[in-house]
């Protein structure tokens, strides 16, 4: 996928500008990132694209020297499953994080 990076968002779209996959996040007061929402277009679900989104986010965080929590249930679960590979970007607060995906500022 061809990933685009914006402030608080990483996404990929097709030639018609339809969103294929994206992750939305915000910077918390302590400087860490909270991944609030991960989306995969229904036509791509079940093909590992969600994991691809998260791996892209994690690598971006690594390059930026940032740590993250995840209020998005998918992102939180992905971090837990991939903890060994990304322990340098996972916040100590991840295990205590309340989870529920945030869409348009609401859980």
Image (spheres, grey):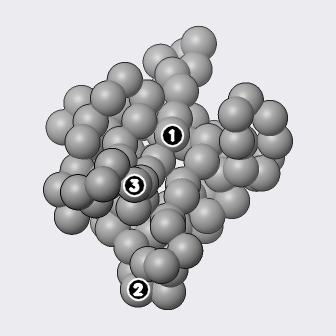
Q: Residues within 10 Å of mark 1 (few under 14, many from 20)?
A: many
Q: Which percent across, then down, holds residue 59?
A: 25, 50
- Secondary structure at badge 2 equals loop
Earlier in the chain: of badge 2 and badge 1, it is 1
Q: Which residue is mark 3?
A: 18
Task: Tell me the quarter of the image containing the C terminus.
Answer: top right
Kindly tell me whether residue 37 is visible in this rendering: yes
Q: Nearer the viewer, residue 66 or 105?
A: 105
Earlier in the chain: of badge 3 and badge 1, it is 3
In the displayed structure image, the side of residue 60 where residue 22 appears, left or right: right
Q: Is residue 77 above or below residue 104?
A: below
Q: Which residue is mark 2?
A: 47
Mark linked to residue 65: none
Kindly tell me whether residue 94 is visible in this rendering: no
Q: Are marks 2 and 1 in contact (CB under 8 Å)?
A: no
Q: Which percent across, then down, holds residue 22?
A: 43, 51
Q: Quadrant of residue 62?
A: top left
Q: Residue at x 69, y 59 (%)?
A: 73
Q: Between tags 3 and 1, which lies in front?
A: 3
């Amino acid at each position: 996928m061809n990933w685009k990076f914006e402030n608080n968002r990483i996404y990929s779209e097709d030639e018609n500008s339809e969103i294929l996959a994206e992750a939305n996040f915000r910077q918390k007061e302590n400087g860490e990132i909270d991944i609030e929402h991960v989306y995969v277009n229904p036509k791509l679900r079940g093909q590992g694209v969600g994991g691809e989104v998260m791996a892209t986010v994690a690598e971006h965080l690594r390059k930026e020297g940032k740590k993250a929590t995840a209020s998005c249930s998918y992102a939180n679960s992905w971090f837990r499953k991939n903890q060994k590979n990304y322990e340098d970007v996972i916040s100590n607060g991840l295990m205590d994080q309340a989870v529920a995906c945030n869409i348009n500022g609401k859980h």
